[in-house]
Amino acid sequence: MPEIFINLDPGFVNHRKVLSVLPEQGIEELNRRISNLPASLMDWEKPMQHNRCYCSVLTEFCRGLRIMTLNQALNSKCSQGCLVASIEEFLPNESIYEDIETESTIIPTIDFERKIIVRYSTDKIISDTLRSELRNGYSFGIIAMIDSRSESELILRPLIIGFPHTYDSHGNLSWGLYYENFRLRIDEIDEFSKVREVELPSDSSPMLSIYESVFKECLSKILGGQTENDWGGESSDFYTDHVTYKGKEFSGAFLLKGKSVPGIMKMRDLGKNANQILHLCDTPAEIVFVQHCNDIGEDVVKHLQTTAVTPLRQRYFCLIDGRDSLRLLMAYGLLEYAQQQSVVMESQKHRQS
């Protein structure tokens, strides 16, 4: 797994709800962590550290149960009482300073016919910074329970709302955008390092004639391993246990789109209910790749980073657009082969029709 992790800095904690979902062992662990806090804590530090204990124990409990992200829950039509944990974009809440009971609206990264509302009490907000960012709109880590579902709305009741920050195995925190620490460039993958020797092409037009299955074959030549025929129930188009980043070996899963999707890759191109990235991130892969013969749309990028990086599980992710795909084939001397094989496949297709 990546040696970078997500930490939620809680600015909202519903203590009663947290205690209601934790099992007896979880409550015992929570009490143990609180009792082990230094006696020298200042009075103003104690509530903050208590809330971090609530957040960490709940996060570990949800991770053990493999709690779904909001996108996964929407796709699976989870019902009342279901817990979700993810990082989501909140719209501005202009009443956050006036109302005791308020609600924020979440913008999902998949099409959803209902409005998604987070309903909560402002007296449980324990951070002025979080209150301010709820007013402005921001991306927050949230662990919540589905409260109700109607024809027009899905209501969530939060247990935790917090800022997602990253930290490494040495405990060093990073305060930038959380997903930047998990997004990899193609030239950072050791097996693809030859692309550094090839200038980025000005356009990706040669890729528009190359079949997805041919690109997959080229990928297998670079990474090793065997390709399998596509079928409807697959979670990824190519999977390998041998992808190296910074000298360390990771497992990798690839979602590939070839000439059958000639334009900019959009969410509508990602299967029924746009669920192919959800399936990709259901694999055990530690690095997930999305490749396309053309540009990759912003909606796909947002959906991938939200699905790949959650409060409970973090994966590296890598986007390989048409120009990077072309550069990869050129770097490994496979462009001419890919073009020839695609011509053969095209002629076979015409003969069969």
Image: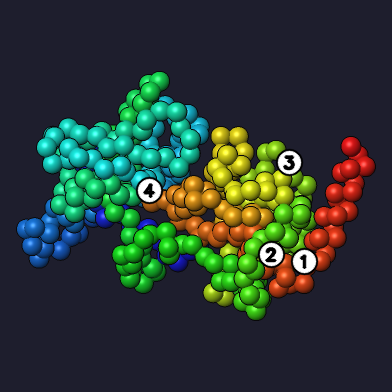
Q: Earlier in the sequence, mark 2 or mark 4?
A: 4
Residue lying furthest top in this view? 151
Q: Earlier in the sequence, mark 3 or mark 1?
A: 3
Q: Which residue is mark 4?
A: 87
Q: Position of residue 287 (x, y in %)?
A: 56, 59
Going by the numbered disc 2, the residue's amino acid type is Leu
| Quarter of the C terminus within the rendering | top right
Going by the numbered disc 3, the residue's amino acid type is Trp
Q: Are marks 4 and 3 in contact (CB under 8 Å)?
A: no
Per the rendering, the mark at residue 16 is none
> Label 2 vs label 4: CA separation?
33 Å
> Label 1 vs label 2: CA separation?
7 Å
Q: Are marks 3 and 2 in contact (CB under 8 Å)?
A: no
Q: Is residue 66 above or below residue 343?
A: above
Going by the numbered disc 4, the residue's amino acid type is Ile
State which mark lies toward you, 3 or 2.
Answer: 2
State which mark lies toward you, 3 or 1.
Answer: 1
Q: Which residue is mark 2?
A: 326
Q: Position of residue 24 (x, y in %)?
A: 29, 40
Per the rendering, the mark at residue 335 is 1
Q: Is residue 31 left or right of residue 198?
A: left
Q: Is residue 221 above or below residue 96?
A: below
Q: Nearer the viewer, residue 43 or 183?
A: 183
Q: Is residue 132 left or right of residue 280?
A: left
